[in-house]
Image (spheres, rainbow, N blue to C red):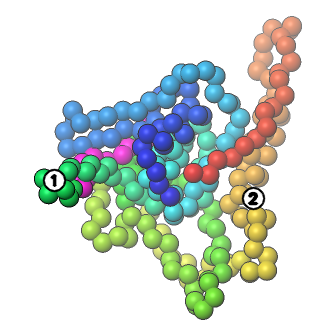
């Protein structure tokens, strides 16, 4: 549900050979900082699906947004939390500190994360889990835009529209709750299987008559920030 900026950059760099991962922008242009992938060898080329939900926040939104914008992975699930602000802590003389919002995070294509989040390529809402014993129902998902005192990003575009609570979402019974009931994971596996199926149908790229046969497809893996 979050993390540190440098760790988000390192995680995204595992699957990106080059290009922008994220940048921060403050009040003036000179405050812009860019974080890029390093060309430290040939990265894996297998297809990827990144699973996200309303709890995917901050650093994990940076990872999802970078892989989505760089066309490295499909993002599947629900719109993310929308924590896209940068805080700087200034120590004070009495030993306390002042935490001040100084900049915003932007994906490689220039999309703001703040109060907008990452919009999945494929929207798949997870059914509600059973409420704990003694509770009638679980509280609704909370996102950045639902918090008192949050600020919007002027001119932010490309994010998901506000989501209205569905009063009757499906509920997973306790007796059947398990990995097989993870509808987002199941859908992601379907996408990956279809992906490789159509890759095989397309066949190898045309080339010289004596070109070597294509190598076997690498094992599929998914990622869930």
- Nearer to the camera, 190 or 101: 101
Q: Which element carries disc 1, helix, strand or loop?
A: loop
Image spot of residue 32 (x, y percent): 28, 35
Point out which mark residue 92 bears.
1
Image spot of residue 195 (x, y percent): 75, 42
Image position of 91 (left or right of 15):
left
Is residue 105 covered in magenta?
yes
Q: In terms of image quadrants, where is residue 149?
A: bottom left
Name the residue: 50% across, 25% down.
38
Comes first in the chain, label 2 or label 1: 1
Give the magenta range: 99-109
Q: Which of marks 2 and 1 is in front?
A: 1
Q: Give the residue number, with chain letter if any, for mark 2.
A: 186
Q: Distance between the residues labelled 2 and 1?
A: 51 Å
Name the residue: 62% across, 83% down.
131
Name the residue: 21% across, 50% down.
90
* Res. 95 visible in picture: yes
Q: In terms of image quadrants, where is residue 170?
A: bottom right
- Nearer to the camera, 129 or 132: 132
Is residue 30 covered in magenta?
no
Callout 1 crowding tier (Cα within 10 Å): few <14, some 14–19, many ≥20:
few
- The tally of labels here is 2
């Amino acid at each position: 549900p979050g993390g540190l900026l440098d760790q988000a950059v390192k995680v995204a760099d595992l699957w990106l050979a080059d290009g922008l991962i994220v940048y921060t922008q403050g009040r003036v242009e000179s405050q812009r900082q860019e974080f890029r992938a390093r060309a430290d060898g040939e990265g894996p080329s297998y297809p990827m699906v990144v699973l996200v939900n309303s709890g995917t926040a901050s650093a994990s939104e940076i990872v999802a947004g970078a892989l989505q914008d760089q066309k490295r992975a499909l993002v599947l699930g629900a719109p993310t939390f929308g924590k896209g602000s940068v805080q700087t802590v200034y120590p004070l003389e009495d030993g306390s500190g002042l935490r001040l919002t100084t900049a915003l995070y932007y994906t490689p294509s220039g999309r703001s994360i703040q109060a907008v989040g990452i919009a999945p390529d494929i929207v798949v809402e997870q059914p509600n889990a059973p409420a704990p014993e003694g509770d009638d129902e679980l509280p609704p998902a909370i996102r950045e835009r639902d918090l008192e005192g949050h600020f919007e990003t002027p001119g932010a575009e490309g994010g998901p529209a506000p989501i209205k609570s569905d009063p009757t979402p499906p509920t997973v019974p306790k007796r059947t709750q398990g990995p097989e009931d993870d509808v987002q994971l199941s859908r992601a596996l379907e996408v990956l299987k279809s992906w490789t199926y159509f890759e095989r149908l397309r066949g190898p790229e045309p080339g010289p008559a004596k070109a070597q046969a294509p190598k076997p497809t690498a094992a599929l893996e998914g990622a869930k920030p």
